[in-house]
Amino acid sequence: MLALERKNLILEKLQEEKKVVVSELSALFGVSEETIRRDLEKLEKDGLATKSYGGAVLKENIGIDMPFQVRKKANMAAKQRLAELAATFIHDGDHIILDASSTAVFLARAIKDRENLTVLTNSVEILLELSDVTDWNIICSGGSLREGYLALVGPKTTESFSGFNADKVFFSCKGIDMERGITDGNEMFSHVKQVMMQSAREKILCIDHTKFDRIAFSRMANAADVDAVITDEKPKERWLNFFERFGVKCVYPKE
């Protein structure tokens, strides 16, 4: 097993259990405890974990992004619910923008029965996911590939999106706050999403319930700048009142 693959598996275990034990990881992966300690040191250096006696605990910092392959496997049930709800907004013949979030990959998978769609994206994973569809116009933004993200960013990416007028954009974020707005952990990703929003008639934010009342590093928009918010659980009443006041449609599973 490659060191990178082992690191991602350790991160998955950290996300699920919030802590890991060196001796257990050593037995699980068939490597020495010293190798595991080096893995944990690297995760601590990357800001993803904090070493503790005999192991490590997850460092839950919303300003730090987990590798895409780890994020994709986190909260899969919530992302599936979000995708099913978001798919109801997409109709045959639509021109849509999908960001490089793991939720958008689930959405791409959920709309494969649509016809004659045009999809613009900066996500390498979505390009792969849609590589088998027919009669669609799939446009890649271009740009620079960020290590571990499977996403294209930079001036070429924003220039590409600014040249289009889409019907809808579906995007995610790290946090949404009534005062500080919609925020993301990385300035480059935040800027790309700002341009995506400017290039679409309808702006649809797809977030799980944990993103409410959280603030990340880079601000991309006001909380009321979107047309709809899709989430996996019913938001608190004050958020529902906020959305109603500003004319933002809020969609969540009805029990």
Image: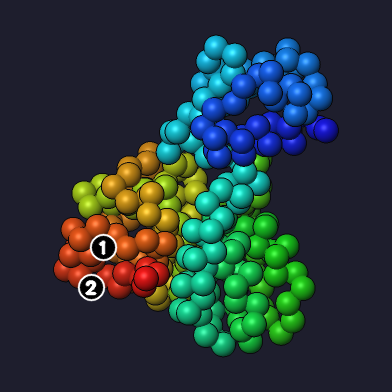
Q: Is 217 left or right of 11, judged from the image as shown?
A: left
| Image position, residue 42 (x, y; %) | 63, 21
**Quarter residue 103 falls in:** bottom right
| Type of amino acid under label 2 | Gly
**Residue sitting at x 44%, y 36%:** 63
Q: Quadrant of the N terminus?
A: top right
Residue 41 lies, in percent from the top left, at 62, 18
Residue identified by numbered label 2: 247
Q: Position of residue 52 (x, y in %)?
A: 53, 15
The answer to whether residue 146 of the structure is visible from this angle is: no
Question: Which residue is rendered at x = 54% and y = 64% of the image?
Answer: 80
Of the pair 90 and 169, the residue shown nearer to us: 90
Q: Secondary structure at mark 2?
A: loop
User: Mark 2 vs mark 1: which is more N-terminal?
Assistant: 1
214 vs 103, left or right, is left
**Can residue 133 be seen here?**
yes
Q: How many dots with numbers?
A: 2
Amino acid type, label 1: Ala
Task: Identify the residue shown where x is 45% and y is 33%.
Answer: 60
Rendering coords of residue 216 (x, y %): 37, 41
Pointer 1 local density, CA inside 10 Å: few below 14, some 14–19, many at least 20: some
Q: Nearer the viewer, residue 108 or 202?
A: 108
Which numbered circle lies on residue 224? 1
* Secondary structure type for disc 1: loop
Q: Are marks 2 and 1 in contact (CB under 8 Å)?
A: yes
Q: CA distance from mark 2 to mark 1?
A: 8 Å
